[in-house]
Image (tube, helix red, strand yellow):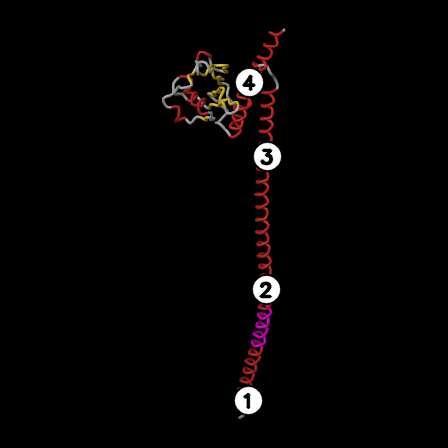
Amino acid sequence: MSESKPARTGHGAYVRKVQEDTQNFAQGLIGEVERLRVLVAALESEKATLAAQAREIETIVRANDVLRAQIEGIKAETKAYSSRYAEVEQQNSNLANLYVASYRLHGTLDREEVIAAIQEIIANLVGSEEAALFEINSDTQALDLLASFGVKRDECPSIPLGGGGLISLTARTGEILVVDPAQLSGATGLESRLTACVPLKLDDKVTGVIAIFGLLPQKGGIEDLDRELFDLLATQAAFALYCTDLHAKVALEAARRW
Protein backbone atom coordinates (compact mmCIF):
# COMPACT_ATOMS: atom_id res chain seq x y z
CA MET A 1 0.00 0.00 0.00
CA SER A 2 2.92 2.32 0.65
CA GLU A 3 3.91 2.10 -3.00
CA SER A 4 0.62 3.81 -4.22
CA LYS A 5 1.21 7.17 -2.48
CA PRO A 6 3.60 8.64 -5.06
CA ALA A 7 0.98 8.08 -7.73
CA ARG A 8 -1.72 10.00 -5.77
CA THR A 9 0.76 12.72 -5.02
CA GLY A 10 1.57 13.22 -8.73
CA HIS A 11 -2.14 13.19 -9.66
CA GLY A 12 -2.90 15.90 -7.07
CA ALA A 13 -0.11 18.13 -8.39
CA TYR A 14 -1.47 17.79 -11.90
CA VAL A 15 -4.96 18.71 -10.76
CA ARG A 16 -3.71 21.71 -8.88
CA LYS A 17 -1.75 22.82 -11.93
CA VAL A 18 -4.83 22.46 -14.09
CA GLN A 19 -6.84 24.39 -11.50
CA GLU A 20 -4.22 27.10 -11.33
CA ASP A 21 -4.03 27.31 -15.13
CA THR A 22 -7.80 27.44 -15.33
CA GLN A 23 -7.94 30.12 -12.67
CA ASN A 24 -5.21 32.12 -14.41
CA PHE A 25 -7.00 31.74 -17.74
CA ALA A 26 -10.30 32.81 -16.19
CA GLN A 27 -8.66 35.82 -14.56
CA GLY A 28 -6.96 36.69 -17.85
CA LEU A 29 -10.25 36.28 -19.66
CA ILE A 30 -12.00 38.48 -17.12
CA GLY A 31 -9.26 41.08 -17.55
CA GLU A 32 -9.58 40.91 -21.32
CA VAL A 33 -13.35 41.23 -21.08
CA GLU A 34 -12.92 44.25 -18.84
CA ARG A 35 -10.40 45.73 -21.23
CA LEU A 36 -12.78 45.15 -24.12
CA ARG A 37 -15.63 46.66 -22.10
CA VAL A 38 -13.55 49.77 -21.45
CA LEU A 39 -12.55 49.88 -25.12
CA VAL A 40 -16.19 49.52 -26.20
CA ALA A 41 -17.17 52.29 -23.80
CA ALA A 42 -14.40 54.47 -25.20
CA LEU A 43 -15.54 53.70 -28.75
CA GLU A 44 -19.14 54.50 -27.86
CA SER A 45 -18.01 57.78 -26.35
CA GLU A 46 -15.92 58.54 -29.40
CA LYS A 47 -18.86 57.61 -31.63
CA ALA A 48 -21.10 59.98 -29.70
CA THR A 49 -18.45 62.69 -30.00
CA LEU A 50 -18.15 62.10 -33.76
CA ALA A 51 -21.93 62.16 -34.12
CA ALA A 52 -22.06 65.47 -32.26
CA GLN A 53 -19.27 66.81 -34.45
CA ALA A 54 -21.10 65.57 -37.55
CA ARG A 55 -24.26 67.38 -36.44
CA GLU A 56 -22.21 70.50 -35.77
CA ILE A 57 -20.57 70.22 -39.21
CA GLU A 58 -24.00 69.73 -40.79
CA THR A 59 -25.23 72.83 -38.98
CA ILE A 60 -22.19 74.77 -40.22
CA VAL A 61 -22.74 73.50 -43.77
CA ARG A 62 -26.38 74.60 -43.67
CA ALA A 63 -25.33 77.97 -42.26
CA ASN A 64 -22.74 78.28 -45.03
CA ASP A 65 -25.41 77.44 -47.62
CA VAL A 66 -27.64 80.16 -46.16
CA LEU A 67 -24.74 82.64 -46.18
CA ARG A 68 -23.84 81.65 -49.74
CA ALA A 69 -27.42 82.23 -50.85
CA GLN A 70 -27.44 85.59 -49.08
CA ILE A 71 -24.16 86.54 -50.74
CA GLU A 72 -25.53 85.55 -54.16
CA GLY A 73 -28.62 87.62 -53.44
CA ILE A 74 -26.48 90.61 -52.48
CA LYS A 75 -24.42 90.15 -55.66
CA ALA A 76 -27.59 90.05 -57.76
CA GLU A 77 -28.93 93.20 -56.05
CA THR A 78 -25.59 94.93 -56.53
CA LYS A 79 -25.59 93.99 -60.21
CA ALA A 80 -29.16 95.24 -60.56
CA TYR A 81 -28.28 98.52 -58.82
CA SER A 82 -25.18 98.90 -61.02
CA SER A 83 -27.25 98.26 -64.13
CA ARG A 84 -29.90 100.73 -62.99
CA TYR A 85 -27.20 103.30 -62.17
CA ALA A 86 -25.73 102.85 -65.65
CA GLU A 87 -29.21 103.33 -67.14
CA VAL A 88 -29.74 106.50 -65.13
CA GLU A 89 -26.30 107.78 -66.18
CA GLN A 90 -27.15 107.01 -69.81
CA GLN A 91 -30.48 108.79 -69.48
CA ASN A 92 -28.76 111.83 -67.96
CA SER A 93 -26.24 111.79 -70.79
CA ASN A 94 -29.04 111.51 -73.33
CA LEU A 95 -30.90 114.43 -71.75
CA ALA A 96 -27.72 116.51 -71.79
CA ASN A 97 -27.16 115.67 -75.45
CA LEU A 98 -30.75 116.59 -76.30
CA TYR A 99 -30.40 119.87 -74.38
CA VAL A 100 -27.15 120.74 -76.15
CA ALA A 101 -28.68 119.88 -79.52
CA SER A 102 -31.75 122.02 -78.83
CA TYR A 103 -29.58 124.89 -77.60
CA ARG A 104 -27.38 124.71 -80.70
CA LEU A 105 -30.44 124.89 -82.95
CA HIS A 106 -31.97 127.89 -81.21
CA GLY A 107 -28.77 129.68 -80.26
CA THR A 108 -28.57 131.65 -83.50
CA LEU A 109 -30.71 133.30 -86.15
CA ASP A 110 -28.11 132.77 -88.84
CA ARG A 111 -29.34 130.19 -91.35
CA GLU A 112 -25.90 128.77 -92.13
CA GLU A 113 -25.17 128.27 -88.43
CA VAL A 114 -28.46 126.43 -87.93
CA ILE A 115 -27.60 124.17 -90.87
CA ALA A 116 -24.15 123.61 -89.35
CA ALA A 117 -25.81 122.72 -86.01
CA ILE A 118 -28.04 120.17 -87.79
CA GLN A 119 -24.95 118.67 -89.42
CA GLU A 120 -23.18 118.50 -86.05
CA ILE A 121 -26.14 116.75 -84.41
CA ILE A 122 -26.32 114.17 -87.20
CA ALA A 123 -22.57 113.56 -87.15
CA ASN A 124 -21.84 113.57 -83.40
CA LEU A 125 -25.08 112.29 -81.90
CA VAL A 126 -26.69 110.16 -84.60
CA GLY A 127 -23.37 108.94 -86.00
CA SER A 128 -23.58 109.70 -89.70
CA GLU A 129 -21.43 111.90 -91.89
CA GLU A 130 -23.64 111.42 -94.94
CA ALA A 131 -26.90 113.36 -94.98
CA ALA A 132 -28.94 115.72 -97.12
CA LEU A 133 -31.32 118.48 -96.03
CA PHE A 134 -34.25 119.15 -98.32
CA GLU A 135 -36.92 121.84 -98.12
CA ILE A 136 -40.28 121.86 -99.84
CA ASN A 137 -40.64 124.27 -102.74
CA SER A 138 -44.34 125.10 -102.68
CA ASP A 139 -44.16 126.53 -106.22
CA THR A 140 -42.74 123.40 -107.86
CA GLN A 141 -44.16 120.89 -105.33
CA ALA A 142 -40.74 119.33 -105.02
CA LEU A 143 -38.08 118.78 -102.41
CA ASP A 144 -35.12 121.05 -103.22
CA LEU A 145 -31.69 120.43 -101.72
CA LEU A 146 -30.83 122.98 -99.03
CA ALA A 147 -27.54 121.43 -97.86
CA SER A 148 -25.64 118.16 -98.06
CA PHE A 149 -23.03 116.62 -95.80
CA GLY A 150 -20.68 113.94 -97.10
CA VAL A 151 -22.58 113.54 -100.37
CA LYS A 152 -22.19 115.50 -103.59
CA ARG A 153 -24.88 118.03 -104.45
CA ASP A 154 -25.35 116.57 -107.91
CA GLU A 155 -26.29 113.28 -106.23
CA CYS A 156 -29.28 115.03 -104.61
CA PRO A 157 -31.50 116.41 -107.39
CA SER A 158 -34.91 117.87 -106.65
CA ILE A 159 -37.39 115.18 -105.70
CA PRO A 160 -41.05 115.51 -106.78
CA LEU A 161 -43.42 115.22 -103.83
CA GLY A 162 -45.45 112.74 -105.79
CA GLY A 163 -42.43 110.55 -106.53
CA GLY A 164 -42.16 106.93 -105.52
CA GLY A 165 -39.05 107.13 -103.36
CA LEU A 166 -38.80 106.92 -99.58
CA ILE A 167 -37.73 110.56 -99.20
CA SER A 168 -40.84 111.85 -100.96
CA LEU A 169 -42.93 109.31 -99.00
CA THR A 170 -41.63 110.80 -95.75
CA ALA A 171 -42.59 114.29 -96.94
CA ARG A 172 -46.11 113.11 -97.77
CA THR A 173 -46.77 111.11 -94.58
CA GLY A 174 -44.92 113.34 -92.11
CA GLU A 175 -43.72 110.19 -90.32
CA ILE A 176 -40.15 109.48 -89.24
CA LEU A 177 -38.84 106.57 -91.29
CA VAL A 178 -36.12 104.19 -90.09
CA VAL A 179 -35.37 102.22 -93.21
CA ASP A 180 -35.62 98.43 -93.24
CA PRO A 181 -33.19 96.81 -95.74
CA ALA A 182 -36.18 95.15 -97.39
CA GLN A 183 -37.51 98.62 -98.28
CA LEU A 184 -34.40 99.29 -100.35
CA SER A 185 -35.01 96.50 -102.84
CA GLY A 186 -35.25 98.15 -106.23
CA ALA A 187 -33.96 101.50 -104.91
CA THR A 188 -31.41 103.27 -107.08
CA GLY A 189 -28.92 106.07 -106.65
CA LEU A 190 -28.47 107.68 -103.27
CA GLU A 191 -31.68 106.18 -101.87
CA SER A 192 -30.13 102.70 -102.09
CA ARG A 193 -27.95 103.71 -99.11
CA LEU A 194 -30.74 105.37 -97.12
CA THR A 195 -30.78 104.74 -93.36
CA ALA A 196 -33.47 107.11 -92.07
CA CYS A 197 -35.68 110.00 -93.12
CA VAL A 198 -36.81 112.74 -90.76
CA PRO A 199 -39.62 115.10 -91.80
CA LEU A 200 -39.24 118.72 -90.71
CA LYS A 201 -42.62 119.80 -89.38
CA LEU A 202 -43.95 123.19 -88.38
CA ASP A 203 -47.43 123.11 -86.82
CA ASP A 204 -47.85 119.58 -88.23
CA LYS A 205 -47.06 120.87 -91.72
CA VAL A 206 -44.06 119.27 -93.40
CA THR A 207 -41.58 121.89 -94.54
CA GLY A 208 -38.66 119.63 -95.47
CA VAL A 209 -36.88 116.31 -94.98
CA ILE A 210 -33.53 115.25 -93.56
CA ALA A 211 -32.26 112.15 -95.36
CA ILE A 212 -29.58 110.20 -93.48
CA PHE A 213 -27.47 107.71 -95.41
CA GLY A 214 -24.56 105.57 -94.21
CA LEU A 215 -23.65 105.31 -90.52
CA LEU A 216 -20.15 105.45 -89.06
CA PRO A 217 -18.39 102.04 -88.73
CA GLN A 218 -18.66 102.06 -84.93
CA LYS A 219 -22.40 102.72 -85.13
CA GLY A 220 -24.26 99.43 -85.14
CA GLY A 221 -27.66 100.84 -86.05
CA ILE A 222 -30.38 103.30 -85.12
CA GLU A 223 -30.93 103.36 -81.34
CA ASP A 224 -33.60 104.72 -78.99
CA LEU A 225 -31.66 107.97 -78.46
CA ASP A 226 -31.47 108.43 -82.23
CA ARG A 227 -35.27 108.24 -82.43
CA GLU A 228 -35.52 110.91 -79.73
CA LEU A 229 -33.09 113.05 -81.70
CA PHE A 230 -35.20 112.51 -84.81
CA ASP A 231 -38.25 113.74 -82.88
CA LEU A 232 -36.28 116.80 -81.78
CA LEU A 233 -35.02 117.49 -85.30
CA ALA A 234 -38.50 117.05 -86.76
CA THR A 235 -39.86 120.01 -84.80
CA GLN A 236 -36.96 122.04 -83.47
CA ALA A 237 -34.88 122.07 -86.66
CA ALA A 238 -37.92 123.07 -88.68
CA PHE A 239 -38.72 125.87 -86.23
CA ALA A 240 -35.10 127.06 -86.13
CA LEU A 241 -34.95 127.23 -89.95
CA TYR A 242 -38.28 129.05 -90.02
CA CYS A 243 -36.97 131.61 -87.50
CA THR A 244 -33.87 132.25 -89.60
CA ASP A 245 -36.03 132.73 -92.68
CA LEU A 246 -38.37 135.06 -90.79
CA HIS A 247 -35.41 136.98 -89.36
CA ALA A 248 -33.92 137.38 -92.82
CA LYS A 249 -37.24 138.70 -94.17
CA VAL A 250 -37.60 141.16 -91.28
CA ALA A 251 -34.01 142.34 -91.75
CA LEU A 252 -34.59 142.78 -95.48
CA GLU A 253 -37.79 144.71 -94.88
CA ALA A 254 -36.05 146.92 -92.33
CA ALA A 255 -33.23 147.58 -94.80
CA ARG A 256 -35.74 148.59 -97.47
CA ARG A 257 -37.43 151.03 -95.09
CA TRP A 258 -34.12 152.65 -94.29
Q: Earlier in the sequence, mark 3 or mark 1?
A: 1
Location of mark 2 (residue): 48
Instruction: Label 2: state its secondary structure.
Output: helix
Location of mark 1 (residue): 5
Q: Earlier in the sequence, mark 4 or mark 2?
A: 2
User: Tag 2: residue type?
Assistant: Ala
Instruction: Label 1: state its secondary structure.
Output: helix
Name the mark on residue 230.
none
Mark 1 vs mark 2: in front: 2
User: What percent of the width, then of the height, locates residue 228?
Assistant: 53, 28
Mark 3 vs mark 1: in front: 3
Which residue ends up furthest to the right in the rendered image?
258
User: Tag 3: residue type?
Assistant: Val
C-alpha gap between disc 4 and disc 3? 35 Å
Q: Earlier in the sequence, mark 1 or mark 2?
A: 1
C-alpha gap between disc 1 and disc 4? 155 Å
Which residues are the magenta region? 24-39
From what the image shows, is residue 9 above or below residue 201?
A: below
Location of mark 4 (residue): 242
Judge by depth and name the residue closer to the eye, 40 or 112: 112
From what the image shows, is residue 248 above or below residue 185?
A: above
Instruction: Label 3: state its secondary structure.
Output: helix
Mark 1 vs mark 4: in front: 4
Q: Are marks 3 and 1 in contact (CB under 8 Å)?
A: no
Judge by depth and name the residue closer to the eye, 86 or 176: 176
